[in-house]
Image (cartoon, coloured by chain):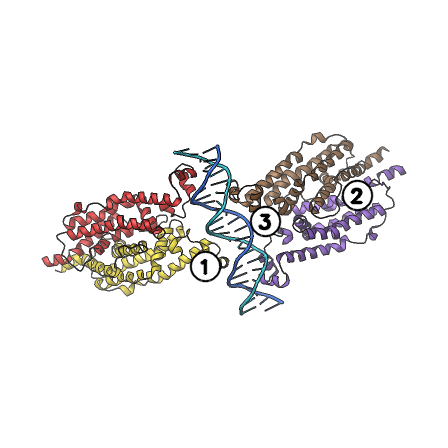
Chain colours: A brown, B purple, C red, D yellow, E blue, F cyan
Amino acid sequence: MFAEKGFAATRLEDVARRADVSKGTIYVYFETKEALFRAVAREALGKRLSRAGDPGTQFDGPLSEVLPRLVSRFVGIPAETRAQAIVRMVIAEAHNFPDLARIWHDEVAMPLIDQIAGVIERSQDLDDDPSRDPRLLAFSVIGPLVMALLHRATFNAIDGFVPDVEALAAQHAQILLGGLLDKHKRKNN
Amino acid sequence: MFAEKGFAATRLEDVARRADVSKGTIYVYFETKEALFRAVAREALGKRLSRAGDPGTQFDGPLSEVLPRLVSRFVGIPAETRAQAIVRMVIAEAHNFPDLARIWHDEVAMPLIDQIAGVIERSQDLDDDPSRDPRLLAFSVIGPLVMALLHRATFNAIDGFVPDVEALAAQHAQILLGGLLDKHKRKNN
Amino acid sequence: MFAEKGFAATRLEDVARRADVSKGTIYVYFETKEALFRAVAREALGKRLSRAGDPGTQFDGPLSEVLPRLVSRFVGIPAETRAQAIVRMVIAEAHNFPDLARIWHDEVAMPLIDQIAGVIERSQDLDDDPSRDPRLLAFSVIGPLVMALLHRATFNAIDGFVPDVEALAAQHAQILLGGLLDKHKRKNN
Amino acid sequence: MFAEKGFAATRLEDVARRADVSKGTIYVYFETKEALFRAVAREALGKRLSRAGDPGTQFDGPLSEVLPRLVSRFVGIPAETRAQAIVRMVIAEAHNFPDLARIWHDEVAMPLIDQIAGVIERSQDLDDDPSRDPRLLAFSVIGPLVMALLHRATFNAIDGFVPDVEALAAQHAQILLGGLLDKHKRKNN
DNA sequence: AATGAATGAGTGTTCATTCAT
DNA sequence: CATGAATGAACACTCATTCAT
């Protein structure tokens, strides 16, 4: 509910009703509404951690194999509305809860970015252009999918354009491969 | 303030203080807090409209010239914190204010996406791969920049990684160009 | 704890913790918080009864011997913080618990006052001034000591003046003796 | 109401009703219930200050004239229930509000005690017994009247013995005079 | 038009009380 | 008998909203 309506707009009474307990029961387990929110946010986040912090090794290999696998990780996610909502919640409440922003930054966003940057860097068949910032490369890789995810989350309730994330992943991976291997191939030519 | 703290967490008393008027004065001009929010959101959004709805013609030309120009439009934006905050606000409140989502979708998001899709489609030197969805191409083009924008907006308050949007724009445009012109070039080879 | 913090400010959870039982256990023995309070107050009060209701006979004798003994009964009391706190509790809660006020009045306050009044009345060497109310005499006798007791109880927690009750008792008894035997002595002169 | 029912047992809704304002109005003027209580306690106390802190000069003169005047100051007080209730409140809440105890100690209790001690000390016709603590003398002087005041306040609600404070003041002053001037007179004899 | 004092419905929080185990 | 998890009525406190001036 926090993810759906935001922290302030979520009433504990509704939370209690949805949890099928009384309002008082919440306070048996959480000191304040904020404490509950932090716990929820942390837990929701924790479930993401496992995926975001995946050992990069399983992604090592030629870029042409690794890249599609990287982007396709986002394909399954939009199916579960939960993840969309959590990302939205973090974006919405980051300013009001800087410590949560910190955790999300340190334990979700940056690990994900660095993992992708690492995978690409380790990829052997890539021409090493030292001018390229590997972290910005990560933005190039997952940015479109993140944007699509947020597009869905934002316009969920209304009738509008719904990007086909699977198609996007395939198409984007292909373009990226072309771009990243571009010079390399031309060199070989 | 709505953009910074969200609708619910923004108190009219604070708004009044910042506007150097009394709380009562707000009600001289706006029926309710929600009416004020809608007005603010619409106006903030309206300022974006002009740019987003730009006639695509000025972007026509060879992709190698047009693409860098498209992505570089995002370079100036993060400088003004306002735009970041507005995007964040829309994402945060879209669920609670579907009509705003509607407006943002119809008058900002889709025009921007379609404009970019159009520019690319009209680009002569692109090999026409009919399997490619032009709208998804737009995601590929601006997704990384949108993601960088949101990264900044979200982790604004904390000390963390700050993507260099200008470098990202340049680098991403180059990669995209490579990818999009890939087959074409090889054909020419 | 009731004596320290008052009825309303005392939480049963704290009582339970201090008694090393669970909150629920209290309700095995007492119907309500009020019932517990009454029981506690009655018992604390009961322990005082024995002394307050002492047969006055043991105090009979010449006033010069009896008076110091009467006031010195208060000397030992302030040592035990409990008694101070109980008096404070009665004063604090008398309004909210009239029945406790009743009991305290009938079984503690008045017996004590009447005992002292009786002792003084029976004292042979006192000139019988019929205009003197014996009960008011009791106030004259123990008032200063009661005040000292309450002074201690009230300003217990802060760093302030602490009356030396023993010195007060001795000094006050001496003054009273002078005053009560005044005419008598002058007569004898 | 705080004086009558204590801090915790006083509901702001009742306070509001008695003040003929809404609950919210209280919060226009006071941050919290505690702030309201402190303000009330301070003000109630402030009204006493003028009397307690009276310049002692007006009481200077022969003890036989000054003493009756000192004790008779308490005669008027019990008539107004307010003062009784305030003293009761202080005794009841001193533990929960140490800072109020501090103020009451510094600005009411001790000034009163020291004033009386000073008056007696300055009194010329008193034999100077250096062994006597002047502050304890103050207890001897006003203790009975304080006790009578509290007796009334405590057993206000029930039907019991009501000390005649006026008679007590007269009688106690007379006894004290006898006791304090005792040796002196005998010397002169 | 602008104010700011007053409002009261709404919400977070407390805590005496219950009861299945 | 003892527990502690659960309760919900009660209460402190907030804040959008009103309105006389």
Which dot, 1 or 2, sits closer to the camera?
A: 1
Q: Which residue is mark 3?
A: A8
Q: Is residue A84 left or right of residue D153?
A: right
- Element under disc 1: helix
The subunit carrying tag 3 is A
Residue D85: % across, % down: 35, 56
Q: Which mark is residue D17?
A: 1
Which dot, 2 or 3, sits closer to the camera?
A: 3
- Element under disc 3: loop
Q: Residues within 10 Å of mark 2 (few under 14, many from 20)?
A: many
Residue type marked 3 = Ala
Mark 3 and mark 1, same subunit? no
- Element under disc 2: helix
Q: Which residue is mark 2?
A: B137
Residue D24: % across, % down: 50, 57
The subunit carrying tag 2 is B
Residue type marked 2 = Leu
Quadrant that contains the N terminus of chain B: bottom right
Residue C98 seen in this snapshot: yes
